[in-house]
Image: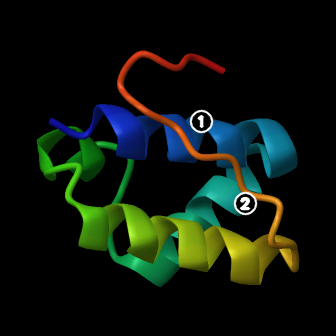
Amino acid sequence: MGKILEQYYDFAKKKGAYALRMRLAMMTGWTTVQIHKIDDSKNNITKVKTALKTLLKSNDIPDFDVKHSI
């Protein structure tokens, strides 16, 4: 569980260090520890991508899948 969500949190860390990842956690309500236990449902992925789009002020957010590594 949470493999795709984990990739988005790693992406946030690479784009904006821990500060961006912390803001992402604040917007979604999920810490990096919690995302490992959360399902990679379409709604959860959309929630994280929407938060990243807002935080980065960009629509250029990649689509990750279970096989994709960043």
Q: Which amino acid does label 1 sit on?
A: Asp
Q: Report the colour scheme.
A: rainbow
Quadrant of the drawing holding the C terminus:
top right
Q: What residue sits 58% from the left and 46% below the top?
A: 63
Q: Pointer 1: what residue? A: 10
The answer for how far apart the CA atoms under marks 1 and 2 are is: 10 Å
Q: Residue 49 at x, y = what percent?
A: 55, 67
For mark 2, give the secondary structure: helix
Q: Is residue 62 above or below residue 51?
A: above
Q: What residue type is labelled 2?
A: Leu
Q: Residue 39 at x, y = what percent?
A: 14, 51
As drawn, is 23 to the left or to the right of 27? right
For mark 1, give the secondary structure: helix
What number is the disc on residue 20?
2
Q: In this view, does 44 lie above or below 8?
A: below
Label 2 CA crowd tier, 10 Å (few <14, some 14–19, many 20+): some
As drawn, is 60 to the left or to the right of 6? right
